[in-house]
Amino acid sequence: MTTFIMVVHIFVGIALILIVLLQTGRGTDIGAAFGGSSQTLFGSAGPASFLGKLTALCAFVFILTSLSLTYVTTRKHNETIFSESEAAVEPPAATPPSEPATPEAPTP
């Protein structure tokens, strides 16, 4: 699942870069070079172009894959250092008492 999301994320990122580079900037008319631009401060308020809509869609998918990758990768690591150390420290198992190290002398 993570691999699929990462592949989609990479392709959408590359597509987003290419789509932004394909778009023309604001005020690229020949009249804009001489200060005769009739656009408003943030560009014309006309309908959005196809590349503008495609950019918004790619940006939405890119953010969605970013958030899903974050969720998937952090969900796997729920254990903490403390849970591992508690599992490593177990009480010793009860062992039967061992026989004495020195053998007793046989009685005649």
Image (cartoon, rainbow, N blue to C red):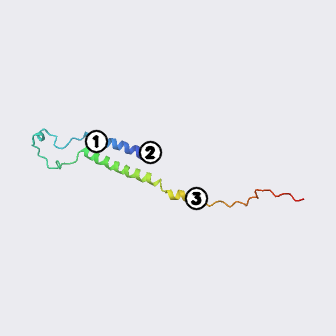
Q: Earlier in the sequence, mark 3 or mark 2?
A: 2
Evaluate whether residue 79 shows in this view: no
Name the foreground residue: 40 vs 70.
Answer: 70
Image quadrant where one finds the C terminus: bottom right
According to the image, label 2 marks what residue? Answer: 3
Q: For the residue labelled by badge 3, is the local secondary structure a helix, a strand or a loop? A: loop
Residue behind mark 3: 89
C-alpha span from label 3 to label 2: 36 Å
Amino acid type at image mark 2: Thr
Query: In the image, 86: left or right of 28?
Result: right
- Residue 94: percent from left, percent from top: 68, 61
Would you place residue 38 above or below residue 82 in this image? above
Do labels 3 and 2 touch, CB within 8 Å? no
CA separation, marks 1 and 3? 57 Å
**56 or 3, which is in the foreground?**
3
* Residue type (three-letter) at the residue carrying disc 3: Val
**Residue sitting at x 31%, y 43%:** 16
Residue with the mark numbered 1: 19
SS category of the residue bearing label 2: helix
